[in-house]
Amino acid sequence: MSAPATAQGTIGVPFHLDAHLPGLRVPVDTGRTVLPELAPGTVWERLAALHAAVADEVAGVATAGGVPLVVSGCCTTSLGTVAGLQRAGVDPAVVWLDAHGDVQTPWTSTSGYPGGMPLRQLVGGAERTGPRRLDLRPVDEHDVVLVDARDLDPAEAEFLASSAIRRVDVPGLADLPLPDRPIYLHIDLDVLDAAEVPGVMYPVPGGPPTDAVRAGLRAVLDTGRVAAIGLACTWPEGVEPGRAARDVAAELARGPGR
C-alpha cells in the first residue's frame, strides 16, 4: 500500500463489521493492526469484542499523548475509538462526515445493517450490547456535528429533526463554531462524490469535491483539539484507493494544528 506517512499512531482495523478483510487496501500506512480472535456469537457480540480491542489500542496511544488514527472498513469501529478515548480520560465531542446519517436503530432500519447505526449508538440509542461491554458513556447530542448526510432514510430524518445533533454541509463546516472540548473527527470516505471514490459499497451521487472535504477537515484539525480520527474505507477487498481517498488521507496525516 502506498500512503503518506503519519505521526499520529495509526491503527489498522481490517474489518467490515465483524468480517475480517485481509485484502482491504487503505490509503494510509498503519503502524499497528487490530486482529482479535472473535468467538462465535451474534454480530453485536462479535463487534463488542472487536471494539474492545480497538479501545485498548486507542487508549494506549491517547494515554501516551498521541492522536490515534483508526483506519477501518466501516464506521462501527468509532465505538471502540470513543471508548478508548474515554478510558484515557478524554470525553470527546464528535464531528462526523458521512454521506449517510448512521442514526438508524434495529427497530427503524429496514435492512438491519449495523453499519447504519454507530452514531445513534454513540449518543446512547440503538443496540446497546457493545456500548455496555465497552462501558461507553453516551456523547451528548449537543456535542455532535453531523456533516453532509445527504442520504437519509425517513426514520433518520425524523430522529434528526427532533435531535440536538447539529447538521451542516461540508462547506459550512469551516465557519461552524465547534464544541469547546476535545474532538473525535470521523470521516467515511463515501462522503465524497461517488464519482471520486469508485468502489464504495454504498455510493451516493451529488457529494462535495475532494478540495471541499479537505478544507472542512483542515478547519477541524486546525482547532488543535482533535483527540482521535476515524477513517472509514467503505469498499470491498481488492479495491485500490483512488486519488481522492489518498488526498483526504494525506490531509489527515498532516495532523492537528499543522
Image: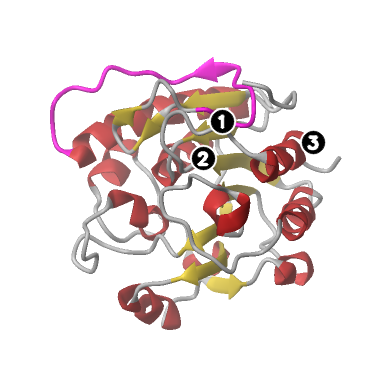
For the residues bearing labels 1 and 2, Cβ distance under 8 angstroms: yes
Q: Residue furthest right?
A: 258
Place of residue 81 in the rendered image (x, y in percent of width and height, measured from the top left): 49, 38
Between the residue at mark 2 and the residue at mark 3, the CA separation in whole angstroms equals 18 Å
Q: Residue 52 location, x and y as percent?
A: 36, 30
- Residue in the picture at 53% in, 29% down: 58
Left or right position of 148 against 170: left
Residue at image position (66%, 64%) is: 208
Name the amino acid, label 2.
Cys
Q: Amino acid at mark 3?
A: Arg
Name the N-terminal-most of marks 2 and 3.
2
**Structural crowding at the residue carrying mark 3, measured as other residues with C-alpha within 10 Å and reported as few (<14), some (14–19) or many (≥20):** some
Label 1: state its secondary structure: loop
Numbered circle sitting on residue 254? 3
User: Which residue is found at the position 59% from the left and 56% from the top?
Assistant: 195
Q: Please provide the residue range marked out in magenta.
A: 25-42
Q: Is residue 98 visible?
A: yes
Q: Which residue is mark 2?
A: 233
Color style of the picture: secondary structure
Towards the viewer: 168 or 234: 234
Q: Amino acid at mark 1?
A: Val
